[in-house]
Amino acid sequence: GQNIDQPTEMTATEGAIVQINCTYQTSGFNGLFWYQQHAGEAPTFLSYNVLDGLEEKGRFSSFLSRSKGYSYLLLKELQMKDSASYLCAVRDSNYQLIWGAGTKLIIKP
Amino acid sequence: IAGITQAPTSQILAAGRRMTLRCTQDMRHNAMYWYRQDLGLGLRLIHYSNTAGTTGKGEVPDGYSVSRANTDDFPLTLASAVPSQTSVYFCASSERGGTGELFFGEGSRLTVL
């Protein structure tokens, strides 16, 4: 079956760096997405990786290794507003998105 | 403001009743989706539509139906609601090309008693 694994919850300190991991087993691969979801709100797009390597976008970076079925989202200079759930999703060979359950990130002052 | 509008934002419904969740987008996206989100689970696809006039079943389609009469509207109907359909429902849309990132509506919180 298809599976996306990511930690349920992580805690980090304001101003620090945190890495949220995502491992996947899917039928084919056509890209990996990271979304941010604040409590009670809709998910919003953060990043997209389809080739191996690091994609940097401001304080956020996303890394992909297709051979290892692995990605991570790196958040630098953490701010209180970064407290949210981070969702990893993989697009499979049928171009359908398979979603992880999300990682709830708690930022402490 | 361009985007996706869902209605209602919240609804309490008696079991057995019929309910339609509305979704409208003004971005002219070809593809639209309905997901449900439950605590501890990833987003689960209920139904999707790749283009107006076509629909497909997702991971959890039972008890739900959709229609896509035009590009902008994609309503989701629960013919006879059951308590297990208590959830937060998100409508989303995407373009066919590019990254295909999803744009989500604000969600509809449905409670079936």
Image (spheres, coloured by chain):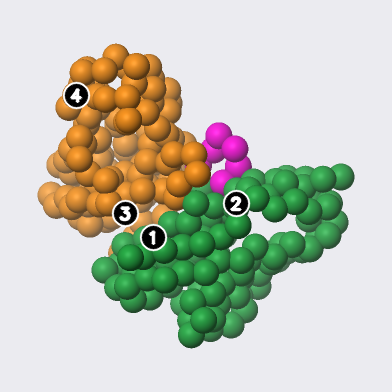
Chain colours: A green, B orange
**For numbered disc 2, what is the local secondary structure?**
loop
Which residue is pictured at 42% across the width and 41% down the height? B37
Instruction: Name the residue nearer the viewer: A86 or A26.
Output: A26
Label 4 residue SS: loop
Identify which amino acid the numbered label 2 is placed on: Thr
In the rendered image, which residue does mark 4 sit on? B80
Q: Secondary structure at mark 1?
A: strand
Number of the front mark, 2 or 1: 2
Total number of numbered discs in the rendering: 4
Instruction: Identify the subunit bearing mark 4.
Output: B
* Host chain of mark 1: A
Q: Which residue position is annotated with label 1?
A: A98
Determine which quarter of the picture holds residue A95: bottom left
Give above or below for A1 relative to A69: above
Q: Using a 10 Å C-alpha cutoff, classify the residue at mark 2 as few (fewer than 14 neighbours), some (14 to 19) or many (20 or more).
A: some
| Both marks 1 and 3 on one chain | no
> Which residue is disc 2 drawn over?
A8
Q: What's the residue type where badge 3 is placed?
A: His
- Image spot of residue A68 (x, y percent): 51, 81
Q: Tell me if mark 1 has few (under 14), some (14-19) or many (20+) residues whose alpha carbon lies within 10 angstroms of its own.
A: many
- Return the disc, 4 or 3, that comes first in the chain's sequence: 3
Name the foreground residue: B97 vs A25: A25
Measure the C-alpha gap from mark 4 to mark 3. Answer: 30 Å
| Residues at marks 3 and 2 on the same chain | no
Mark linked to residue B29: 3
Segment tinted magenta in the rendering: A36-42
The Cα–Cα distance between marks 3 and 2, rounded to whole angstroms, is 33 Å
Q: Give the chain letter at badge 2.
A: A
Quadrant of the snapshot with the N terminus of chain A: bottom left
The mark that comes first in sequence, 2 or 1, is: 2
Is residue A16 shown above or below A43?
Answer: below
